[in-house]
Image: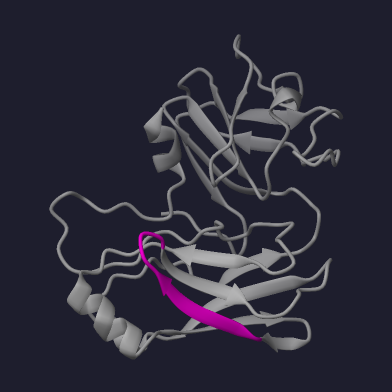
Amino acid sequence: MRWLALLVALSACSEDEEGPYLDSLQPFPCEDNLDSQPVFTIPHSFDRTTLNAVKANPPVFELTGPDGIEPITVEFVDSIGLQIIASSVLLPDRDFVLDLVDRAGLGPDTEVPAMFPARFSTRNVARVRVVVARAGRVTISFSQPLDPDSVPANVMIPGSTRAAQYFDTDFHQVYFETADTDQPITVTFGPGLRTAGGLLIAPEPITIVPRDTTFVAAGCFYE
């Protein structure tokens, strides 16, 4: 089921791609219920020479909240990638934006996914951030993990004979299959849908065209 993740991947690099690149930001943009001191990770493809050059002149990121710019540190961790670490505790129920404000040593040749500025929050909510449908195969990405046991009975799909499934990827995906049609359907959610932490949620109904739909919530990212 690897293609499930590819449906909502931030970026994909072909086998014959050349040049250095930054990969997908983790957690995924529009993540809610962030840790109070989050660590953002960006894998990269740098060889040792490129990595040393970037370490000597690292890119500049800013994490901005309602009270202004939050202190962060940027580190390169072997086998993990570039890490952006909040230096102080983020208050609950706040919205934050992470932005790349200066490429610095990344230079013009490093490919960077167009995901900045990326929106996050410390609010304990679960919102729909990306919906992708292709040929009757549908994924719905939520902004925090769901309780897998609550999904099958609480995601109602017109015309489908199979219950929705939950995949605990970085994208917190609900997946289902329905008829490959150009006729719109409306997916609704039952009162028992809840997050992994037990919060009951009530997403608005979603109308999609199963053959081809791409929905990206404001401030989120899909490529």
Nearest the viewer among 165 and 177 is 165
User: The C terminus is located in which quarter?
Assistant: bottom left
Q: Which residues are magenta?
A: 71-80
Question: Residue 181 in the image: x percent, y percent?
Answer: 47, 23
Q: Is residue 98 above or below residue 16?
A: below
Residue, far top: 161
**At 26% from the left edge and 74% from the top edge, which residue is drawn?**
110
Indicate whether 177 appears above or below 168: above
Identify the main secondary structure in magenta.
strand
Give the colouring mode of the picture.
one colour
Q: Residue 215, position in %: x, y?
A: 55, 48
**On the image, which quarter does residue 153 sit in?**
top right
The picture places residue 140, in percent across and down from the top left corner, at 59, 38
Between 76 and 195, the one lying in front of the other is 76
- In magenta stretch: residue 78: yes
Image coordinates of residue 129 in percent, x first then y, are 62, 51
Q: Which residue occupies 66% across, 80% down?
A: 87
Picture layout, residue 73 above or below residue 14: below
Q: Quadrant of the N terminus?
A: top left
How many numbered circles are shown?
0
Any part of residue 107 in sight: no
Q: Residue at x 58, y 36 (%)?
A: 168
Q: Is residue 68 left or right of residue 218?
A: right
In the image, residue 87 lies in the stretch drawn in magenta: no
Q: Is residue 79 visible?
A: yes
Q: Quadrant of residue 92?
A: bottom right
Residue beneath the point at 37% across and 61% down: 23
Q: Is residue 100 left or right of residue 22?
A: right
Residue at the front extreme, as displayed? 78
| Relative horizontal placement of residue 118, taking residue 45 as reference (left or right) | right
